[in-house]
Image (cartoon, rainbow, N blue to C red):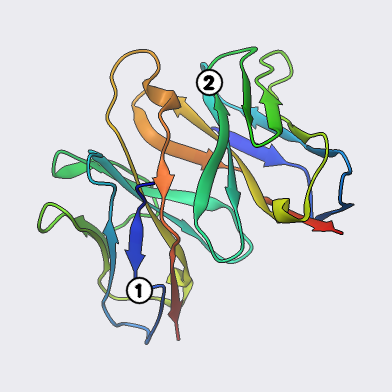
Amino acid sequence: GDSVTQMEGPVTLSEEAFLTINCTYTATGYPSLFWYVQYPGEGLQLLLKATKADDKGSNKGFEATYRKETTSFHLEKGSVQVSDSAVYFCALNAGGTSYGKLTFGQGTILTVHP
Amino acid sequence: EPEVTQTPSHQVTQMGQEVILRCVPISNHLYFYWYRQILGQKVEFLVSFYNNEISEKSEIFDDQFSVERPDGSNFTLKIRSTKLEDSAMYFCASSEYRQGPGRFGNTIYFGEGSWLTVV
């Protein structure tokens, strides 16, 4: 079945460091890919998405490129801030008959220190 | 910005009791969902709901679970007889309905979640 695998966490960085959170997926067909973020005490918020191969999603300085050849959607940010501390979830929508069914990775906790 | 709201934020219930979790989806959305996250595990899809009926459900969503849109604005998840393993964060979500090739890239908007603890 469909699955998403994220890099093991937690990840701890200093402010202004470069961030990469790896995400790989397994799916039949051509899924849409998403990164959601959960800040402390809040719900899941869409950070960015990509719906076809080679698309790049971007938002708030974060980027991720849909790589079909490596089945990956790694999240990157050039310079993290303390306010980026949160849990990050990679997810896919495999389509077909499953209109709104997202399959999530296990989440990666990011802590950024001043 | 419109948001999905959920109540209660936290509920403690005894095993075997019925629980109803409530949600108010974004007003112009037509698709509604429940997901859950057991502590330390992945967020899992439970059910989707469209046009007043279940569109899809996972194997987790057995006869103990039911959903309802009782009044055109609320969307509820009922667990008839709670078990210890039902303890989890339950997320309500909603989305617009789109047709065509881009429909699976549609954004799903989540609420803040309801923590259910079964003792």
Name the chain letter of the residue that bears numbered label 2: A
Between marks 1 and 2, how big is the CA–CA gap? 37 Å
Along the line of sight, the residue nearer the viewer: A13 or A71 = A13
Q: What residue type is labelled 1?
A: Pro
Kindly identify which chain the residue marked by label 1 belongs to.
B
Relative to the observer, which residue lies in front, A59 or A33?
A: A59
| Residue B18 in view | yes
Q: Is residue A9 left or right of residue B72?
A: right
Looking at the image, is mark 1 or mark 2 nearer the viewer?
1
Position of B93 compared to A71: left or right?
left
Observer-nearest of B21 and A114? A114
Query: Which residue corresponds to mark 2?
Result: A28
Q: Is residue B36 left or right of residue B61?
A: right
User: Mark 2 belongs to which amino acid?
Assistant: Thr
The residue singled out by tag 1 in the image is B8
Badge 2 marks a residue whose secondary structure is loop
